Image (spheres, coloured by chain):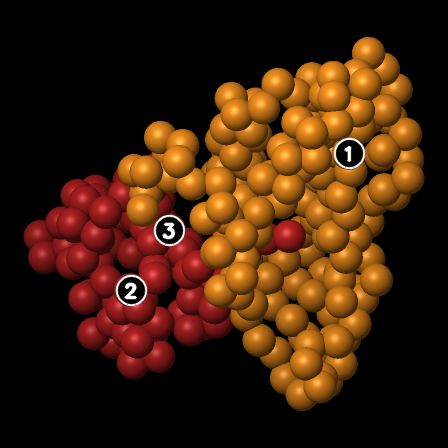
Chain colours: A orange, B red
Amino acid sequence: MINIASAPFDPGAELSAFEKKASGAGAVVSFIGKVRATAGEDTVKALYLEHYPGVTERSIGEIESEARQRWAIDDAHIIHRVGELQPGEPIVMVCVASAHRREAFEAADFLMDYLKTKAMFWKKEVREGGEAWIEPRKEDYKDAARWRGSARDDEEE
Amino acid sequence: MARILFFGKLADAAGGRSRDWPLNEATKTIDDLVSALCAKEDALASALNEKSVRFIINEMIAPRDAAISDEDEIAFLPPVSGG
């Protein structure tokens, strides 16, 4: 399930619902990404996230399909915030269920790497010292490249 | 009239998230459209000409030389960054 949320969500409630839904699975892995309160020396006042309705959902759907091709996962749930967020608020949550832990860990790791670098979101940090649009760091692209070897990545890179 | 969408920092450079733009004989491809948009605005010109900018026509990723027509929705995307 893919959910682009314009209002804050409760990760505990989401995980609990996911766990119930995936009751037959032997392993459930979840990750929560949160808004940092600092950017280097500067203080972050807010984070603003925008997306391209329709196209963004499809780009995440493609990422999820690729995860399902690569790992035997029973279920996946991706929630991603848009709009204005405050420091400490969750931005993204990924839940993966599988028969055994390895698939769930790896699929969740893959989903996050691709959400950071391929899903269609744009984010702006509003800092004490001004505003800045954030682009993936070198480390983010390097993390995503760890999964290279699929047909899709070969085409792109 | 084509519908043009700007995302992220490109919306800042364009001074808005969308605009309607009449296409004519001189704007047959995305590349032509970039030239037409850039002819009037310097801030937008440098932003749209960055190599990292990608293009979408009617919700499908398209190359810079892709043909466009007057009913299209054309989006300009800076590098994405989720999570």
Q: Residue at x 90, y 29 (%)?
A: A16
Of all chains, the one bearing label 1 is A
For residue A29, which numbered disc appears in the image? 1
Residue B23 on image: x %, y %: 20, 52
Identify the residue position indicated by label 2 in the image: B51
Which image quadrant for residue A3?
A: top right
Q: Is residue B17 left or right of residue A22?
A: left
Going by the numbered disc 3, the residue's amino acid type is Ala
Above or below, A105 against A97 in this view is: below
Question: Are the numbered discs 1 and 3 placed on the same chain, yes or no?
Answer: no
* Three-letter amino acid code of the residue under disc 2: Lys
Q: Residue at x 52, y 25 (%)?
A: A70
Closer mark to the observer between disc 3 and disc 2:
2
Residue bearing the label numbered 3:
B75
Position of A22 with respect to B47 (left or right) is right
Measured as percent of width and height from the top left, residue A35 is found at 75, 62
CA gap between label 3 and label 2 equals 15 Å
In the rendered structure, which amino acid carries the disc numbered 1?
Val
Image position of A106 (left or right of B28): right
Q: Are marks 2 and 1 on the same chain?
A: no
Could you say which is closer to the camera, residue A40 or residue A50? A40
Q: In the structure shown, which secondary structural element does the residue marked by tag 2 occupy?
A: loop
Residue drawn 74% across the image and 21% down it: A100
